[in-house]
Amino acid sequence: MSARTATVSTGAWVMRLALLALGAAVLLGGIGYGVETPEGLVGPGMMPVAAGALMVVAGAWECLKAFRAERSAVAAAPAEADGAGADGVAADEAAQLDVFGRTSRQRNRAVAVVFGVILLAVVLAYAIGLLLALSLMVVVLLTFVEKKPLWVGLVAGVGAFAFGYLVFGMALNVPLATGALGLI
C-alpha cells in the first residue's frame, strides 16, 4: 500500500465536503428568507444564515487542515519506510487514532449518532417546543456522545435553555416554537 492511499480517508473527505455543501445551501436558503424584517428586526433567515456561515467556515477549515495533514504525511512517508515511527507504533495504527484516542470507526459512529439526535430534536420540537428539544439534545450529546458526567450534561442543557430564552425570547423578541403541547 502506498503512502498516499494509507493517509487519505475517502469517507472523511466526503463528510467534510458534505458539511461544506450543506452549509452553503443553508446559508443561501436563509438569505432567501430574509435576514431582517422591514421594521429592522431579526428576520426569519438570520439563524439559518448564521448557522450556514458557521458550517461553511468549519467545513473549509476542516478541509484545509486535513489537506495539510495528508500532505505532510505523504512527505514524511519515505522517511518511515519501515512502517514504524520513533516510538515503535505502526504508522497506520497511529494515523487511525485521533487526539482523543478514538478509532475511525468510533468517530464515524459518533457522527451518525449526532445526526440521529439532531433529527430526533427536530421531531421533538413539534411536540415539546424548540427550546426544550434543543436543551434535551445538548444533554444527550454531552452525556452519551461526549461521555461527560450526567450533571455536566444537565447543567449545559439548562444553560442552553436559559441562553435561548434570554437572548432569543426576551432580548430579540423572536417568537419561539412552543410545540403541540404549548409548554414553553
Image: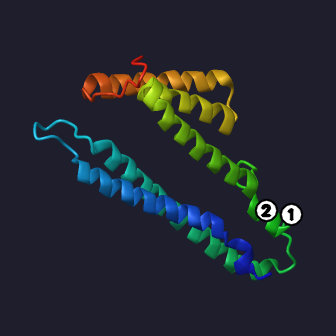
- Under mark 1, the amino acid is Val
Of the 4 image quadrants, the one containing the N terminus is: bottom right
Q: Quadrant of residue 153?
A: top right
Image marks 1 and 2: residues in contact by CB distance under 8 Å: yes
For label 2, the SS is helix
| Left or right: 155 as drawn, with respect to 77 | left
Is there any visible trace of residue 134 in the rendered image?
A: no
Lower sequence index among marks 1 and 2: 1
Q: Is residue 148 above or below residue 21?
A: above
| Left or right: 168 as drawn, with respect to 145 | left
Q: CA distance from mark 1 to mark 2?
A: 7 Å
* Relative image position of residue 85 (x, y in whole percent): 83, 68
Q: Residue at x 24, y 26 (%)?
A: 173
Q: Is residue 171 above or below residue 119?
A: above
Q: Quadrant of residue 144?
A: top right
| Left or right: 127 as drawn, with respect to 89 | left
* Relative image position of residue 130 (x, y in whole percent): 42, 29
Residue that label 2 marks:
94
Is there any visible trace of residue 47 in the rendered image?
A: yes
